[in-house]
Amino acid sequence: MATILGGAALAATVIAGGTPAQAGSWAVNAANRNGMVTNEYAYWNPTSRNSLHSPYWLMNSGSLFSRKVAGGPAFWTGRPDNKAPDARSTNGTNSAVFRMITRNASFRNVTVGMSLNISGLTATSSTPAVAWDGVHLFLRYQSEESLYYATVARRDGAVVIKKKCRGGGSNGGTYYTLASTGGYRIPTNKWRFVQASAVTRGDGAVNLAVWVAGRRVSIATDNGIGCAAITKAGRTGVRGDNANFFFRSFRVRT
């Protein structure tokens, strides 16, 4: 186990076992103190001396903090708003649209999991409340236009597996729903372990699944729905929409 500093940014503890794309596990935990880890300012201003860069995360929207909370340190979105943050997110977080991915892009057949605690859902003038507000896990993230994601907590109580393909739609891509299961309301201020997996089968199709609090609640098979199945290794990560949340023990295992 090693603690590594990334510039002036807070450290994160990384546990690595073997090569992440081949064997073992890869995990990031928050530092045991309060402060900012990174934000979108660092992503869009990579040469600025004021930027805080994380050695593990890339964030093109929102802000990421480390907080000491009951039960151990955790990552936090900060209070979500729609204000473009400065270098230290002192004027706002823009975490109403929270988009964070790993620098590591070698994750293929993996299960991604984390402990999640949602304080509540919000809305802003530019991000009004919608059914898909909540928290999602990225799988095989190639770009903003090509990815899988699994919703582990949603405003309307659904657990959803989706794929985004290049061409049309928002941000140059079109979403395709691969599976949707209702009846899972968000319990606020409660820790739950959530997971999602992607595994390529021998025939080239991709099996996907979502677990909430130890229970598998949604499964899907992508055999080319909307576009070719995403079989290449990619990044993992966390997405939030109008959600104020904490997470810890972000782990990827093969």
Image (cartoon, grey):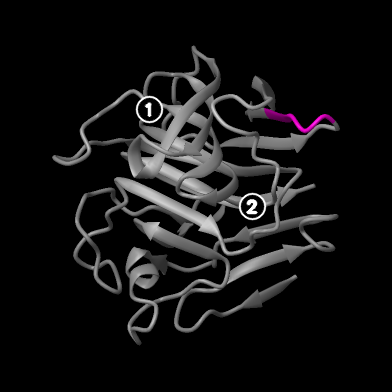
- Furthest toward the top, the residue is 183
The x and y percentages for residue 80 are 28, 48
Range covered by the magenta-colored residues: 203-208
Front: mark 1 or 2: 2
Left or right, 70 with reference to 21: left
Residue 71 appears in the figure: no
Nearer the observer, 233 or 138 = 233
Q: Is residue 205 magenta?
A: yes
Q: Is residue 90 magenta?
A: no
Q: Residue visible at 82% across and 29% down?
A: 203
Q: Residue visible at 34% across and 38% down?
A: 170
Q: Residue tagged by mark 2?
A: 234
Of callouts 1 and 2, which one flags the residue occurring earlier in the amino acid sequence? Answer: 1
Q: Is residue 145 above or below residue 150?
A: below
Left or right, 6 with reference to 216: left
Measure how far apart labels 1 and 2 are at the Cα level.
Answer: 24 Å
Look at the image and tell me in which quarter the N terminus lies. Answer: bottom right
The image quadrant of residue 93 is: bottom left
Q: Is residue 44 above or below residue 237?
A: below
Left or right, 111 with reference to 45: right
Q: Amino acid at mark 2?
A: Gly
Classify 10 Å Cα crowding around label 1: few (below 14), some (14-19), many (20 and above): some
Nearer the observer, 143 or 109 = 143
The x and y percentages for residue 211 are 65, 28
- Determine whether label 1 and label 2 are within 8 Å by CB: no
Q: Residue visible at 50% across and 18% down?
A: 184
Report the number of discs: 2
The x and y percentages for residue 43 are 39, 68
Q: Amino acid at mark 1?
A: Trp
Q: Residue tagged by mark 1?
A: 132
The x and y percentages for residue 31 are 54, 67
